[in-house]
Amino acid sequence: MALFKDMLHSDESLFKNELALDYSFLPKILPHREQQQRYIATIIKPLLTGKNGKNIFIYGAPGIGKTAAIRFVLNELEEETEEVVPVYINCWQKNTTFKILVDICEQLGYRLTHNKRTEELFQIVKNMLNKKAAVFAFDEVDKLEEIDFLYAILEDIYKKSILLITNDKEWLDNLDDRVKSRLLPESLEFKPYNLEETKDVLKQRVQYAFVSDVWDDDSFELIVKKTAEAQDIRIGLHLMRESGNIAEDKSSRKITLDYTNEAIKKIDEFTIKKSSDLTEEEQNILNLIKKNSEKKIGDLYNVYKEQGGELGYKSFQRKIEKLEKNKFVTVKKTSGGADGNTSIVKYATETKKLTEF
Ligand SMILES: Nc1ncnc2c1ncn2[C@@H]1O[C@H](COP(=O)(O)OP(=O)(O)OP(=O)(O)O)[C@@H](O)[C@H]1O
Ligand SMILES: [Mg+2]
């Protein structure tokens, strides 16, 4: 009997380059986003001929290549010219004017940011960038707590394009009028990939990440289907990695349907699709939000307490975060105003839930 012949040896792997399944991995070609990249390039293009650039508002659901497309365009720009400086900021990580300016300084190679005030940092950025032209990509703008830096850039950086990227189509509507009227952006929607497009994107990753011929066709097709239904490429990347790991654990040389099904079952545990999958407490809070949509989180908590809710404020906030993560509600951060910074919680009427796994 050749009991061990088909088994994967301990020094072998199904993965050729597992890093290619990381969400931050940028492949050499981005299939099915050429049109969007070209459009973004036209926004920036005037800067290459010494004119002022245009601005653009980019929106679309999570996991459909917005960030990837932007990074791609900025990389190409960097290859093309030294006269236009690309700046990319993740506003989830850098959500205040000060943090953003420190980040820009660092990207420009200016390291002496320590102990400097916001205004001083902006002067430095301004002096450096006004010698050239700049493209600013602000990703995840709905997570910003302040927008003063936008106003400052619009006023004081002469040649620039500003790209604003978000999941929240309405973000722009609520922007300060003075900023809005200076920005006057064009807008570009990223739509989810269809089944065939999803397949192309995932096929490319299989080639990057796995040793050839380890995928059973059925398994791969199933992942494509689940990913297209979920309309989120990250789901596919996750399922491919999980299926590979499970197959390896079982010393299998092939990623068969069994392993993929197991990976899909696991994902179920952390992706909630139906409100009936929420705990009773979470359902109560969701109902409360439904009846009191677009209230400040503090006010919402007061109503919750009045109705006999027992959670502390922190735990209540965590529940809201969970509801947001699973797209039952949206949370908008606002800054300024009489109450300082606060979050407005809105019931998601057109909740885009992940389709049944
Ligand atoms: N056309 C594509 N070709 C190759 N990989 C892609 C493509 N579209 C998306 N991806 C990959 O899918 C993952 C998610 O894409 P990305 O980070 O760009 O999503 P996003 O639209 O910015 O989502 P979010 O709104 O959550 O930030 C990334 O690993 C990205 O490389
Ligand atoms: Mg993104």
Image (tube, grey):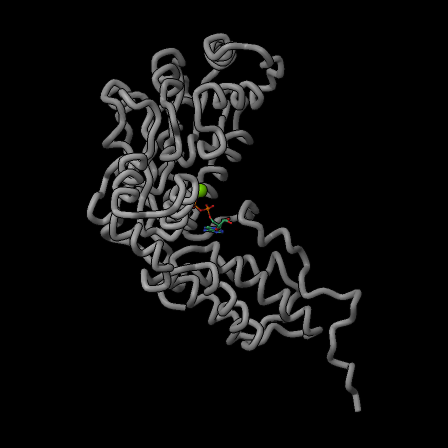
Q: Identify the residue at the far bottom of this view.
A: 1
Residue beneath the point at 53% across and 23% down: 103
Q: Nearer the viewer, residue 311 or 82?
A: 311
Q: Nearer the viewer, residue 64 or 78?
A: 64
- 219 lies above or below 311: below
Percent coordinates x, y for residue 348 in the rendering: 26, 49
274 sits to left or right of 107: left
Residue 195 visible to an observer of this rendering = yes
Residue beneath the point at 68% across and 59% down: 16
How many marks do you count on the picture?
A: 0
Q: Which image quadrant is residue 37 in? A: top left
- 343 lies above or below 227: above
Q: Identify the residue at the far left of this view.
A: 291
Percent coordinates x, y for residue 44 in the rendering: 39, 28
Residue beneath the point at 31% across and 21% down: 336
Residue beneath the point at 30% across and 42% down: 305
139 sits to left or right of 344: right
- 280 lies above or below 53: below
Q: Which image quadrant is residue 144 in? A: top left
- Please state, as top left, top right, bottom left or bottom right, where the C terminus lies in the image: bottom left
Residue 51 visible to an observer of this rendering = no
Percent coordinates x, y for residue 153 in the rendering: 39, 17
